[in-house]
Amino acid sequence: MFNYDQYLRLDKFPLIWCSGCGDGIVLKSLLRAVHKLGLQKDQICMVSGIGCSSRLPGYVDFNTLHTTHGRALTFATGIKMARPELTVLVITGDGDATAIGGNHYIHAARRNIDLTVLLFNNHIYGMTGGQVSPTTAKGKKASTAPYGSFENTFNISGLAQAAGASFVARSGVYNPVQLENYIVKAIQKKGFSLVEIMSPCPTAYGRRNREGTPVDMIAWQKENSVPVAKAGQLTPEELEGKLITGILVDIERSECRAEYQKLIDRLAQS
């Protein structure tokens, strides 16, 4: 049987996540993916910013870096440029990555640097006060939108695709085996890889918006998820309010650190 303890800092437990939070499911999927790939703990560097998702590196026994709000990708970029042999994982959230960190997100994808980004999308700033995030749906309530948000939302996966990512997938905590498989593929892919993970926030989001129990919120994910192949057969009206899941991008593009090495080699020969 798989032993999670070998990858955990057990002295940091219990977890700070709320009851019913999906982040613990993501943690277990991630550890199974690492184990499946046979990665040694010292081969991994995990970087996070600020937020509920970004507490995850504190619980794992890898090389970890808990950084400033929105800057996880900048720290991770520096690590990968200096130590390209490391597997660099970025743990971030919808607010951390696409609000204060939005510009870094776009340009990390544009550069196509070999980072694996696990982006937890819970539609709200959970840890820092329940404010509206770039993915809070129109009409949904938050501490900064007591009468409902009136703003349009980001398509997080679409943004990475448009910016030039090599690999983009979307899954949810209702399907932890699929999530594990996508994390494996993302780590194996050379270039900027994103797995957008739909993870419910029953406390800051669910209570305000009367979404029911944590089980109800996960069940809603499952019932409203549409595989990407099926989504291509549906009209925009039929896809309204649905979650399109699956591998959205899987292409070959030149990787940033490899191109940098070519420059170094060329200059050394001149």
Image: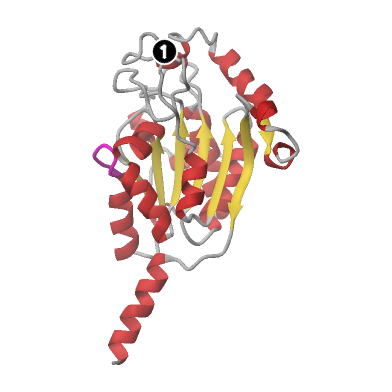
Tell whether position 13 is magenta. no
Give the quadrant of the C terminus: bottom left
> Would you say 157 lies left or right of 53 here?
right
Residue 173 x/y as whole percent = 57, 29
Residue 95 in view of the camera: yes
Residue 159 x/y as whole percent = 47, 44
**Residue assigned mark 1:** 148
Give the quadrant of the N terminus: top right
Count residues near mark 1 (Cα–Cα under 10 Å), then give few for <14, some for 14-19, many for 20+.
some
Residue drawn 41% across and 19% down?
A: 150
Image position of 195 with respect to 238: above or below: below
> Would you say 236 lies left or right of 124 here?
right
Residue drawn 44% across and 16% down?
A: 205
Image position of 251 with respect to 61: above or below: below
Residue 240 x/y as whole percent = 62, 26
Residue drawn 63% across and 32% down?
A: 175
What secondary structure is marked by label 1? loop
- Going by the numbered disc 1, the residue's amino acid type is Gly
Location of residue 50 (image quadrant): top left
Residue drawn 41% across and 57% down?
A: 110
Residue 212 x/y as whole percent = 55, 8
Instruction: Tell me which segment is drawn in magenta.
Output: 63-71
